[in-house]
Image (cartoon, rainbow, N blue to C red):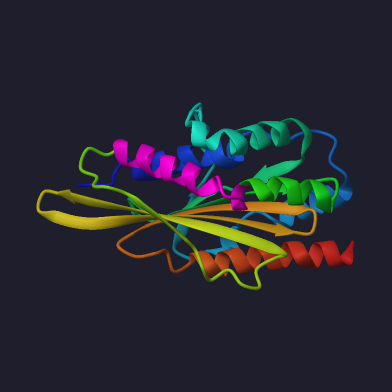
Amino acid sequence: MILRRTPVLVVAALATLVALAAPATAGESKSDQAILKAGVITKADVPSDWTSKKASSSDQQLRAPECREIKTAVDKAKKNTPRRRSRDFEPSGSSATSAQDTVYAFKNVSGATNFFANYSDSTANACFEALADELARGEPSAGTPAVAPITDLQGVGDEAVGYEITIPYAAGGESTTLYVDFVVVRQGRVVLGFGFSNRDVRIPEGPPIVRAVVGRVADVQASA
């Protein structure tokens, strides 16, 4: 059976990019708490047959020099910014499909904009290419990975950017492709990082989940 270990590798790799498994900071305001509650994926956002588990921790470090700017921004945000991590969601019995997210509530729009910029500037693609290589090395049956922009994020939040990693596999006479999607959205002073994986095709549940969660955050901010 191929791809058995892949979701673990995906979650660990994504954790290094937005501190998915890091504990929340103290000193959250009521407004922050409402935003953070709205910004995590919940059971209502995924199909009814999906299950969830507590977010897994990871000691993996993002060592690639191409990711230095992102790592520096994440390390700073971990110390100063309230955040929440969703549970890890996946279909029952799946070996490759997963969905999770992290939400950050910055003090102001400027702070959120500066953090988001690390994922949309000219160096970010090189970081995701390094991540793709790392994921492929984790599976001996993997072929050469590729990274492409996600282009259907128009109208999602105030700013949005996405990267799709595809990794071909061939083992035991079976060929397939793992799709790993990473989406970052800024909505006002909030930044959300989504991680998805799926086998054979891009995860169809991903875009509706992103829009539902971002919409909730926008509603909370509008009512504050």
Q: Residue 185, relative to residue 144: is it above or below?
A: below
Along the line of sight, the residue nearer the viewer: 209 or 94: 209
Q: Looking at this view, name the residue that lies furthest to the left.
A: 173
Residue at x 14% of width, y 55% of height: 174
Residue 55 seen in render: no
Which residue is painted at 34% across and 65% down in the image? Answer: 201
Residue interval drawn in magenta: 119-138
Name the residue at the front extreme.
122
Q: Which is the main secondary structure of the residues drawn in magenta?
A: helix
Which percent across, then down, holds residue 212?
63, 68
Residue for point 65% across, 58% down: 185
Camera-nearest residue between 87 and 66: 66
Q: Residue at x 47, y 44 (%)?
A: 126
Res. 215 visible in picture: yes
- Give x and y (percent) for residue 121: 61, 50
Q: Position of residue 131 (x, y in %)?
A: 43, 41
* Rendered location of residue 11, percent (x, y): 47, 42
